[in-house]
Amino acid sequence: QTAQLRGPAMPTAKERLAVELPARQLLWLNDRAAAHELSDAGKAFRCCVMFQIAAGLERATETPPTTEERVVATSFELAPEQHLWVREQMLRVGGGASQVASEVCASCMRADAQHVFGVIRCKSGAVAESDVACEGARAALAKQRPR
């Protein structure tokens, strides 16, 4: 079962998720943050998590990092519902937070960047397409620059 994100509003305080990622994935998150004018790699990772919640996490087809590949310890702040989803995926795949985070990144690296970073999603995972969306999406839509 995936995280039930609908229903009463959950607290918005973020929870820190400590992971180890291949350096190339952290570099990719930083690149995506810069390319899409996001605040940092953590925001890029949260976009990836929301995309995966909406789309369903694909198991990574690439091999885990080799002993020669540098792995970087980092952490991301996640909303409670995002943290819950990561924990559910840990149980589903039988791995730790680092494995799930790496699979989230690998899947998003294969996806169309516009689908991952070019949309605003409500905490429910729904794409916000108008000013009638959730409050957070309304604020994000109001800040968007005309393109």
Image (cartoon, helix red, strand yellow):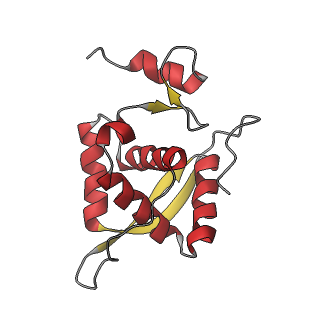
In the displayed structure, 119 sits above or below 31; it is: above
Instruction: Identify the image quadrant of the C terminus.
Output: top left
The structure residue drawn at horizontal position 64% and vertical position 48%, both measured from the top left corner, is 80
The structure residue drawn at horizontal position 38% and vertical position 42%, both measured from the top left corner, is 116
Compare residues 76 and 60 and report the one nearer the observer: 60
* Horizontal side of residue 90 vs 129, given as left or right: right
Compare residues 116 and 45 and report the one nearer the observer: 116
In the displayed structure, 4 sits above or below 129; it is: below
Could you tell me residue 27's position as x and y percent?
25, 57
Compare residues 98 and 109 and report the one nearer the observer: 109
Instruction: Identify the image quadrant of the N terminus.
Output: bottom right
The quarter of the picture where residue 133 lies is top right
Task: Using the rendered image of the protein, determine whether residue 74 is visible from the camera's viewpoint.
Answer: no
Task: Using the rendered image of the protein, determine whether residue 4 is visible from the camera's viewpoint.
Answer: yes
The structure residue drawn at horizontal position 40% and vertical position 19%, both measured from the top left corner, is 143
In the displayed structure, 88 sits above or below 14; it is: below
The structure residue drawn at horizontal position 38% and vertical position 45%, both measured from the top left corner, is 44
The quarter of the picture where residue 64 lies is bottom left
* Horizontal side of residue 93 vs 75, given as left or right: right
**How many numbered marks, from 0 up?**
0
Could you tell me residue 90's position as x and y percent?
58, 68
* In the image, farthest residue toward the right: 8
* Horizontal side of residue 33 vs 127, given as left or right: left
